[in-house]
Amino acid sequence: MKYQKKVKDVMLPISTYPTVHISGTLLDAVRSLENAQKHRSSEIEPYRAVLVVDDEGKIIGKIGHLSFLKALEPKYNILIDIDKLTQVNLSSEFIETIMDHYDLWRDNFFDICAKAHNIYIKDIMMPIIQNISQEASIAEAVHKIIMWQTLSILVTDGSKIVGILRLSDLYKEVANFLLNECECAKNYKE
Protein backbone atom coordinates (compact mmCIF):
# COMPACT_ATOMS: atom_id res chain seq x y z
CA MET A 1 0.00 0.00 0.00
CA LYS A 2 1.38 3.38 -1.02
CA TYR A 3 1.04 6.52 1.10
CA GLN A 4 -1.19 8.87 -0.89
CA LYS A 5 -1.55 12.07 1.15
CA LYS A 6 -0.37 15.35 -0.30
CA VAL A 7 0.46 18.71 1.26
CA LYS A 8 -3.12 19.90 0.68
CA ASP A 9 -4.33 17.13 3.01
CA VAL A 10 -2.21 18.35 5.93
CA MET A 11 -2.06 22.13 5.45
CA LEU A 12 -4.27 24.71 7.13
CA PRO A 13 -6.34 26.84 4.76
CA ILE A 14 -4.93 30.35 4.63
CA SER A 15 -8.34 31.80 5.53
CA THR A 16 -8.12 30.24 9.00
CA TYR A 17 -4.71 31.69 9.87
CA PRO A 18 -4.21 34.91 11.87
CA THR A 19 -3.07 37.94 9.86
CA VAL A 20 -1.97 41.50 10.46
CA HIS A 21 -1.62 44.37 7.98
CA ILE A 22 1.91 45.51 7.18
CA SER A 23 1.11 48.98 8.55
CA GLY A 24 0.05 47.51 11.91
CA THR A 25 2.03 47.39 15.14
CA LEU A 26 3.48 44.58 17.18
CA LEU A 27 0.55 44.92 19.55
CA ASP A 28 -1.87 44.46 16.62
CA ALA A 29 -0.06 41.23 15.71
CA VAL A 30 -0.22 39.94 19.29
CA ARG A 31 -3.94 40.72 19.42
CA SER A 32 -4.54 38.90 16.13
CA LEU A 33 -2.62 35.85 17.31
CA GLU A 34 -4.39 35.70 20.66
CA ASN A 35 -7.80 36.16 19.03
CA ALA A 36 -7.08 33.31 16.63
CA GLN A 37 -5.99 31.08 19.54
CA LYS A 38 -9.31 31.67 21.29
CA HIS A 39 -11.32 30.72 18.21
CA ARG A 40 -9.34 27.76 16.88
CA SER A 41 -10.66 24.24 17.07
CA SER A 42 -9.12 22.05 19.76
CA GLU A 43 -7.98 19.62 17.03
CA ILE A 44 -5.73 22.30 15.54
CA GLU A 45 -2.28 22.81 17.03
CA PRO A 46 -1.78 26.32 18.48
CA TYR A 47 -0.75 29.07 16.08
CA ARG A 48 2.83 30.21 16.50
CA ALA A 49 2.92 33.03 13.97
CA VAL A 50 0.91 35.76 12.32
CA LEU A 51 0.96 36.24 8.56
CA VAL A 52 1.57 39.75 7.26
CA VAL A 53 -0.62 41.05 4.44
CA ASP A 54 -0.28 44.08 2.16
CA ASP A 55 -2.99 46.46 0.91
CA GLU A 56 -4.21 43.88 -1.63
CA GLY A 57 -4.43 41.16 1.03
CA LYS A 58 -1.40 39.36 -0.39
CA ILE A 59 0.73 37.50 2.15
CA ILE A 60 4.19 39.01 2.20
CA GLY A 61 5.68 37.94 5.51
CA LYS A 62 5.24 36.43 8.93
CA ILE A 63 6.03 37.15 12.54
CA GLY A 64 6.60 34.28 14.92
CA HIS A 65 6.98 34.06 18.67
CA LEU A 66 10.74 34.66 18.54
CA SER A 67 10.30 37.73 16.34
CA PHE A 68 7.78 39.14 18.82
CA LEU A 69 10.25 38.85 21.68
CA LYS A 70 13.26 40.13 19.70
CA ALA A 71 11.29 43.19 18.63
CA LEU A 72 10.66 44.22 22.24
CA GLU A 73 14.39 44.72 22.82
CA PRO A 74 15.69 46.83 19.92
CA LYS A 75 19.29 46.51 21.08
CA TYR A 76 19.37 43.08 19.43
CA ASN A 77 19.60 44.99 16.15
CA ILE A 78 23.07 46.27 17.07
CA LEU A 79 24.45 42.81 17.71
CA ILE A 80 26.34 40.87 15.11
CA ASP A 81 23.97 38.90 12.86
CA ILE A 82 21.95 37.23 15.61
CA ASP A 83 20.56 34.60 13.23
CA LYS A 84 24.06 33.41 12.39
CA LEU A 85 25.07 33.46 16.05
CA THR A 86 22.25 31.10 16.89
CA GLN A 87 23.62 28.50 14.47
CA VAL A 88 26.69 27.89 16.63
CA ASN A 89 26.75 26.43 20.10
CA LEU A 90 27.07 29.35 22.49
CA SER A 91 27.89 28.76 26.12
CA SER A 92 25.65 30.13 28.85
CA GLU A 93 28.53 32.31 30.01
CA PHE A 94 28.93 33.87 26.56
CA ILE A 95 25.21 34.58 26.31
CA GLU A 96 25.23 36.22 29.75
CA THR A 97 28.25 38.32 28.73
CA ILE A 98 26.39 39.60 25.68
CA MET A 99 23.35 40.39 27.81
CA ASP A 100 25.47 42.34 30.29
CA HIS A 101 27.67 44.06 27.69
CA TYR A 102 24.77 45.33 25.59
CA ASP A 103 22.60 45.97 28.64
CA LEU A 104 19.78 43.86 27.21
CA TRP A 105 16.43 43.62 29.00
CA ARG A 106 17.57 46.04 31.72
CA ASP A 107 14.76 48.55 31.20
CA ASN A 108 11.64 48.19 33.27
CA PHE A 109 9.74 45.35 31.63
CA PHE A 110 6.56 47.43 31.48
CA ASP A 111 8.46 50.18 29.63
CA ILE A 112 9.74 47.63 27.13
CA CYS A 113 6.24 46.24 26.58
CA ALA A 114 4.84 49.75 26.13
CA LYS A 115 7.05 49.99 23.04
CA ALA A 116 4.79 47.44 21.35
CA HIS A 117 2.53 50.35 20.30
CA ASN A 118 5.41 51.88 18.34
CA ILE A 119 7.01 48.82 16.77
CA TYR A 120 5.77 48.47 13.21
CA ILE A 121 5.20 45.19 11.43
CA LYS A 122 7.09 46.32 8.34
CA ASP A 123 10.23 46.68 10.47
CA ILE A 124 10.15 43.26 12.13
CA MET A 125 8.46 40.84 9.75
CA MET A 126 10.29 38.01 8.05
CA PRO A 127 9.62 38.13 4.29
CA ILE A 128 8.23 34.89 2.93
CA ILE A 129 10.22 33.46 0.09
CA GLN A 130 9.72 29.71 0.28
CA ASN A 131 6.58 27.90 -0.79
CA ILE A 132 5.41 24.45 -1.77
CA SER A 133 2.74 23.20 -4.13
CA GLN A 134 -0.43 21.81 -2.59
CA GLU A 135 0.12 18.76 -4.82
CA ALA A 136 3.59 18.05 -3.41
CA SER A 137 4.19 14.85 -1.48
CA ILE A 138 4.56 14.76 2.28
CA ALA A 139 8.13 13.51 1.72
CA GLU A 140 8.95 16.65 -0.28
CA ALA A 141 7.40 18.79 2.45
CA VAL A 142 9.52 17.11 5.13
CA HIS A 143 12.61 17.66 2.98
CA LYS A 144 11.87 21.36 2.47
CA ILE A 145 11.07 22.01 6.15
CA ILE A 146 14.39 20.41 7.11
CA MET A 147 16.46 22.12 4.43
CA TRP A 148 14.98 25.56 5.03
CA GLN A 149 15.01 25.11 8.84
CA THR A 150 11.58 26.73 9.04
CA LEU A 151 8.49 26.23 11.16
CA SER A 152 6.07 26.75 8.26
CA ILE A 153 5.83 26.98 4.49
CA LEU A 154 3.18 28.72 2.42
CA VAL A 155 1.24 26.36 0.17
CA THR A 156 0.39 27.35 -3.38
CA ASP A 157 -2.07 26.35 -6.08
CA GLY A 158 -0.31 27.72 -9.12
CA SER A 159 0.60 31.27 -8.14
CA LYS A 160 -2.16 31.60 -5.52
CA ILE A 161 -1.38 31.05 -1.83
CA VAL A 162 -4.01 28.67 -0.46
CA GLY A 163 -2.63 27.41 2.81
CA ILE A 164 0.18 27.07 5.28
CA LEU A 165 1.98 23.87 6.17
CA ARG A 166 3.33 23.98 9.70
CA LEU A 167 6.06 21.81 11.18
CA SER A 168 3.73 20.80 14.02
CA ASP A 169 1.06 19.52 11.62
CA LEU A 170 3.63 17.79 9.42
CA TYR A 171 5.20 16.10 12.42
CA LYS A 172 1.78 14.96 13.65
CA GLU A 173 1.00 13.45 10.25
CA VAL A 174 4.33 11.62 10.02
CA ALA A 175 4.13 10.41 13.64
CA ASN A 176 0.59 9.08 13.11
CA PHE A 177 1.69 7.31 9.96
CA LEU A 178 4.67 5.73 11.72
CA LEU A 179 2.61 4.60 14.67
CA ASN A 180 -0.09 3.10 12.47
CA GLU A 181 2.34 1.48 10.05
CA CYS A 182 4.39 0.03 12.89
CA GLU A 183 1.22 -1.54 14.29
CA CYS A 184 0.25 -2.86 10.86
CA ALA A 185 3.73 -4.21 10.24
CA LYS A 186 3.79 -5.83 13.67
CA ASN A 187 0.41 -7.49 13.08
CA TYR A 188 1.49 -8.58 9.59
CA LYS A 189 4.61 -10.30 10.95
CA GLU A 190 2.68 -12.17 13.64
Image (cartoon, rainbow, N blue to C red):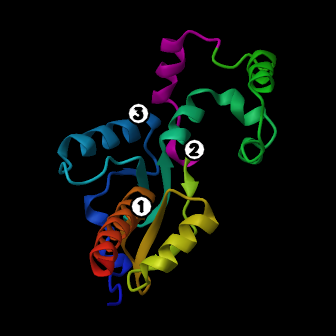
Residue 153 in sight here: yes
Q: Residue at x 54, y 19 (%)?
A: 112
Distance of label 2 from label 3 (alpha carbons): 12 Å
User: Magenta part of the protein: which range?
Assistant: 106-123
| Three-letter residue code for mark 3 | Leu
Say if 57 sits above or below 117 in the image.
Answer: below
Q: Residues within 10 Å of mark 2 (few under 14, many from 20)?
A: some
Q: Secondary structure at mark 3?
A: helix
The answer to whether residue 54 is left or right of residue 163 is: right
For the N terminus, give its image quadrant.
bottom left
The label shown at residue 124 is: 2
For the C terminus, give its image quadrant.
bottom left
Q: Earlier in the sequence, mark 1 or mark 3?
A: 3
Distance of label 1 from label 2 (alpha carbons): 28 Å
Q: Residue at x 57, y 44 (%)?
A: 124
Indicate the position of residue 114 as horizontal and vertical percent values. 47, 20
Say if 145 sits above or below 114 in the image.
Answer: below
For label 3, the residue is 27
Q: Secondary structure at mark 2?
A: helix
The answer to whether residue 56 is left or right of residue 142 is: left
Q: Residue at x 72, y 36 (%)?
A: 77
Residue at the limit of the structure toward the front, as seen here: 190
Q: Earlier in the sequence, mark 1 or mark 2?
A: 2
Distance of label 1 from label 3 (alpha carbons): 30 Å
| Three-letter residue code for mark 1 | Tyr
In the image, 149 versus 188, the foreground residue is 188
For label 1, the residue is 171
**CB-based contact (under 8 Å), mark 1 and mark 2:** no
